[in-house]
Amino acid sequence: MVSFTSFLVAYGLALLPALVAGLPAVPHHFQKRSFSRHEITAATINAELGIQLSTGSLIFGSDSPLWPDATSRWDTLVRPNVQVVVEPADESDIAKIIKYCNDNSFEFLIRNRGHGITSSLSSFSGLEINVERLTGITIQPDEQTATLQAGVYGGLVIKTLWDQGYVTTTGATRCVGVMGPALGGGHGRYNGLYGLVTDNILHYNVVLANGTEVGVNETSHPDLLWALKGAGHNFAAVTSIVKKIYPREIETWHYHNYTWTQDKLETVFEALNTFHKSDNGTTPPKMGVNYGSIIMDKSISTTEAVLKWGFYYAGPAAEAEELLAPFNAIGAVAENTYDASYPVIADFTAGDCAAGRYAISSALSLQWNATAERALYDHYLANVARYPELGATAYLWHEGYATAAYQAIPSDSTAYPHREENHIMFFATSVPEGSGLLATANRWAKESTDIWNAGQPGREPKVYVNYARGHDYETLGSIYGREPWRLERLRALKAAYDPANRFRFYVPIVSNSTHHPRPHGCEK
């Protein structure tokens, strides 16, 4: 048999045009590029791309005074290698930027405020699309939805809608963007009444990996809609969404914060378990969330940690305090209450916006295990004594959201896989620069998570994707769902919508062997 190569050698290239003409056409976005640029400069991109973008768009490099803010990270251990930043002034610019990157073999990364903590972001090297300038919020004529652009963040959305008589679901911290958490689910204080952030999105305007702009909803690309609601970082660049909003019917929220000494630990967690089943088997929906920590407070004790717990109630103090009676009876060493509008209450977690070099590990659970919490306390206290530089900022964090609204949604209706879970927990500490304690801090984090998971016998560990760190013990099944069909469906959709795996820098469901995140177990 004559090979194809021998055929060409024997007969020359005269027949090549005819042969090529007979081959099926390769779509533009799958064609191999004739070159690949390894150096990306702002001057080159400004000359080539700048003329295509809307007036007001910016392109700059590390010599620009805008660079520090545009490339800052909440967790400074996450270090994507950004070479050039492009800030679009209009939604339509994003498709142009992505097409330009594809045509020039540049990697691209969407950024909005920089709060992602996954180590896979550190494998990125290329052009950052910073969407912080896209902050439009438009209430639609139906007064039941609003269009939010890609760069909006929690505090802006909360205040803008509140001032016009509305509320909606956002994450719990005002400085964090809306789109990032929403693509992974999105927990917040309105969980119990209205569901997750993603549950309230009716329509996505997105740019696919090939630069195509599409609208995604129940009748247009419904398969992609499913994926965007829980695993969306893997599939598209969101330019705007249409989201449910609700009348501002609750004018005042009540906040009650307790500080308990360690001898109350078992009593507190038993009371919490009872409380979270007190409303027809679930948390009272208007008790939006309770956040608690095991933490050192030297104003109370220099040798023992304390329990600090804050409850957020959507309503007046009298209603809230009736529900909180069991906690009032425990006997706190310190407590305070506050009543204010929702925008003011939402600012109470503003301290979480401070950047640092964080060691983090997290878990999910159905209920609190007081025995495990005691073991965690003892483990925490021993490590605080052993590593005082880490102990100064270390804490064990507990999130207990109201779950009624988001658990009413069928689990298989979205890619978000953890609707049955009631609580989120994580360990965090800030690692001082040059301390050499990063590996130690990561070990402390893992051991804490191991204790939490050991307190759930018969259950496999699960991780909320927005808190996934990239540890080797965080499996894709623990993040995207233990049911085999979930990852199978996600990978099939990935092959359909992003076959080149362009969106692979945030907890990727398909890895790329040529890109390896920098390890967090050693100092850099």
Image: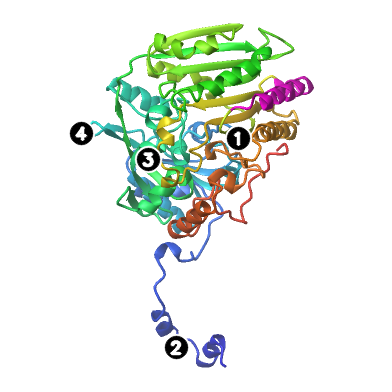
Q: Which residue is mark 1?
A: 363
Magenta span of residues: 368-391
Label 3 Cα crowd, 10 Å radius (few <14 / some 14-19 / many 20+) = some
Upstream in sequence: badge 3 or badge 1 = 3
Determine which of the numbered discs, if any, sits on residue 14 in the image. Answer: 2
Residue located at (51% from left, 63% from top): 35
Q: Tell which of 26 and 295 is nearer to you.
A: 295
Q: Is residue 375 visible?
A: yes
**Residue furthest left in the image:** 141
Q: Three-letter amino acid code at disc 4?
A: Pro
Determine which of the numbered discs, if any, sits on residue 297 in the image. Answer: none
Q: Is residue 50 visible?
A: no
Q: Tell which of 396 and 159 is nearer to you.
A: 396
**Which type of secondary structure does the marked residue at label 2 adopt?**
loop
Q: Three-letter amino acid code at disc 1?
A: Ala
- Alpha carbon of mark 3 to alpha carbon of mark 2: how far? 49 Å
- Alpha carbon of mark 2 to alpha carbon of mark 1: how far? 65 Å
Residue 177 screen position, x and y as percent: 44, 33
* In this view, the mark in front (2 or 4): 4
Looking at the image, do the residues carrying marks 2 and 1 touch, with CB atoms under 8 Å apart?
no
Q: Three-letter amino acid code at disc 3?
A: Ser
Q: Which residue is mark 4?
A: 141
Determine which of the numbered discs, if any, sits on residue 57 in the image. Answer: 3
Q: In the picture shown, does residue 472 fall above or below 284?
A: below
**Residue furthest right in the image:** 386
Residue 158 screen position, x and y as percent: 37, 24
* In this view, the mark in front (3 or 1): 1
Residue located at (71% from left, 39% from top): 521
The colour scheme of the drawn protein is rainbow
- Alpha carbon of mark 3 to alpha carbon of mark 1: how far? 40 Å
Q: Three-letter amino acid code at disc 2?
A: Ala
Q: Tell which of 207 and 172 is nearer to you.
A: 172
